[in-house]
Amino acid sequence: MIAGTWQRLRRDGELRRGLARLVLAILAVQAVYWLAVRPLLGAPELPDTLFEVSSVEAAQIATPDRAGIEAAQFEPAEFMFTGCCDPAYYAVRLTFDLDQPMPDGVGMTPSIQADNARVYLNGHLIVNDGAMALPQPTIERLRNIWFFSPDLLRPGTNTVEIVTVRATMPYTDVTEPRIGPWPDMKRAFGWREFQFGELSWIGISTCLVLALAALVLFLRGGRNPAWFWLAVLTSAWGLRLYLAFWAEFPLGGNGRVLVWSVTITLVALGWASFANEWGGRPVRWLRYALPALTAAKLGLNAVALYTYPSPEGYDTSSLIDLWGGVLLAGIAVLLLLRHALLFGLRHALETALFLLLAMLVGIEALQTLQLVSHVGGLEWTAPLIFVAFAASFLSRNIRLFRSMEEYNEQLATELAAREKEIADAYAERQEVARQQALLTERQRIMRDMHDGMGGRLMSIAAQLKAQGSAAPPPAALADELMEALDELRLIVDSLDTAGDDLGMALGAFRARMESKLAAAGIESEWTIDEHAAETTLSATAILDIYRIMQEACANMLRYSGADHFEVALRAREDGAVVLEMADNGIGLEGDADQTGGKGLANMRSRAARLGGQIAFAVNAPGLKISLLLPPAGTSATPTQ
Amino acid sequence: MEGDTTSAARIVVIEDDAPTRAAFCAAITRDPQLALAGAAGDHDEALPLIVAGEYDVLLVDINLGTRKSFDLIELSRANHEARIMVISVLGDEDSVISAIEAGADGYILKDGAFADLGQPIAQVLAGEAPISPGVARHLLRRFQPSTMAGSDAESVALSRRERQVLTEFARGASYKEVARKFDISLHTVGDYVKTLYRKLQVNSRGAAVNKALKAGMIEL
């Protein structure tokens, strides 16, 4: 399998690039964290002007005040001083020596694991936060730099007495404090104050906002479990940070420890479950196994805390926290690896951030066992990592939106394809209708040809056969043949333009007629209204219109003496179409003879067949013929 | 060729109908702008004339017989820069379009009276392209999206303006009328027509490639 993977790696450039991206992302994230974030948020550099602690004594005391201290029997002690195991007050007395005056005062940072503490300097109470009295002391953050006023300091030996109270945990720890000139201490530990104070609040609000955002995304974004678990993860982390500020905790000592366990376990659960759901292809059974494991672990925590005697209960619970955390973190790391394998290393940045979190959680677990102290700094950096993670997650979501665009594009393409199909189908139907029209028209036109052209050609043949004086001159015969040819062309054109619009039908006629008119010295002018041109008529209707126009042109050529001819096709408001032909000849006078009269009658009968009307008007000078065609659909079909 | 306005344009006529051919030859001889370079009555007679290539314009009757006219057009197109015009009877615009697909530059309609050969020939020599309503109408039909398949339709689809111009021609408008209607120059109108003809050749080539691909004759 490894050989196969290696082969794949060698062949698959995409995979190689993906791996390179991942390695780069991991290196970059680790470098940024350890070289920039961690030093910035991490342990301060100690000033070299610290005073040495010259002696340490400790005692359990009866009351957390001067009287308690005075009454106690102090015994020599060492740092770290540890008191155990029931809720109790302790006093740790230490001395340091000053060989010169300290006009700016002295600062001391304590390192105390207790619920609350009071500090006396040379017998004066200088630090006194919250409540000290058992059984319910308040829980204070003992992380400030305490200020020793120069007024209370003495040259030579100074005495500091730290009185502690502890009810939540069995252990009271006092590690060696750092004491130095106030300005140096402030410079070195001011940042630490900020960390334990404002920065924690920033972390809490960040987690709260992230949790809300994730919850909204979960509820409104298709119930993707990944968002839910991200909400669990961030809110649990926020709670974890907030617990340190919760001075008057209602559930008592074991309750507080248990809530602490619940919080950090929810962080681990949220994290592992998120890792499972992250890529959209979760390991199904883990969906149930992880919460079950968490519940079991918390059950064990509760049993240990409430049934074991102190301090075994607390110790056992801590061990359960440790191994539960390691187990869940291990699962999350495995899921992370699975994710990386499944998704072709596409989410390099998220993977790298995830890896960093995994490391920090591991370090945190070791910290719980007090095997290391404050190496990772997870407590303050986690919100930052969450933000980075959410940002990279969101940037991938923007990519999702982009793919939404692609999806839209695809839809648009499909839509266009469908529209084309419909258009094609429509065009095809039109073509079919055209063919149908041609078929039905053909019979009529065949009959027409037979009657009209057939008769003409027969007459020409008869004339050609005629002998002697009956024989017509060849020129006359040629004219008659041309007329027959014209007739044929009209029929061909009417068939050819069937299905096209009226404008095109007139165009065909114009192409035939224009040169003929030009040869006769008649200038013609054609005006085709766009709207009227779009009327569609049957082949027979067009043939009738052609014949009317042919007749009009023939009359004009023969009798009118016109030199100008105007054809106009107009649309009326009611949808009717008017075809006007006007010349500047002699008008109707020349039409008095037989042929002309017959011509007009022919035009009238054809107009009637079209379902329209024809009118002849004197145009001063000339003749104007108006053919009115009814609106399409009303009676454009010729009457039989 | 185009620049050769001083000397008469040399014309070769290929027309199977003897009286028509004679009428064409007579019309060419009459016109001082034109010079008759040869005449042929069928495909075989025409071949040596085309191979020799001593002409500026080739007039080919479109109805020499199955594909024979088109073969001649393609031969001339492949070997010379001479302009090619097809001679067509009114009403067979489909053949005219096939001829343009084969590479013809224009056409002359046989309409009884062979009034003026000089004008359409001069037009074609000047790089213009004649278009009749019938040809325009057939072009419109030819470029209807439904009659073209897939990628061909894409590559040779008509623009809106081209379709408008073509429709005007189909309705009988002259170059001048089209120019006035769309407020463009005569030259631009000519460009439209040439573009349309070019697209027709593209169309034909695309269709040929497509057909060949489908038949498995060529592979890409």
Image (cartoon, grey):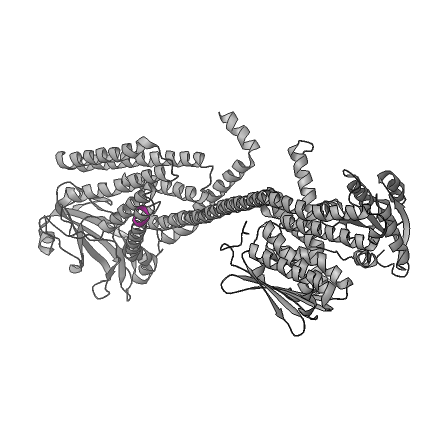
Q: Is residue A240 left or right of residue A2?
A: left
B151 on left or right of A140: right
Q: Magenta region: which residues? A: A214-218
Residue nearest the observer in this picture, B33 or A59: B33
Q: Is residue B39 magenta?
A: no
- Name the foreground residue: A608 vs A318: A608
Looking at the rendered structure, the number of numbered marks drawn on it comes to 0
Q: Specify whether residue A57 is in view.
A: yes
Which residue is found at the position 40% from the left and 47% from the top?
A: A393
Whether residue A215 appears in magenta in the rendering, the answer is yes
Q: Position of residue B87 (x, y in %)?
A: 79, 49
In the rendered view, tell whether residue A9 sits above or below residue B129.
above
Q: Is residue A370 visible?
A: no
Examine the rendered structure and indicate whether residue A583 appears above or below residue B111.
Answer: below
Looking at the image, which is closer to me, A556 or B98?
Answer: A556
Residue situated furthest bottom in the rendering: A620
Chief secondary structure of the magenta span? helix
Q: Is residue A561 above or below residue A281?
A: below
Residue A74 percent location from the top left of the image: 14, 47
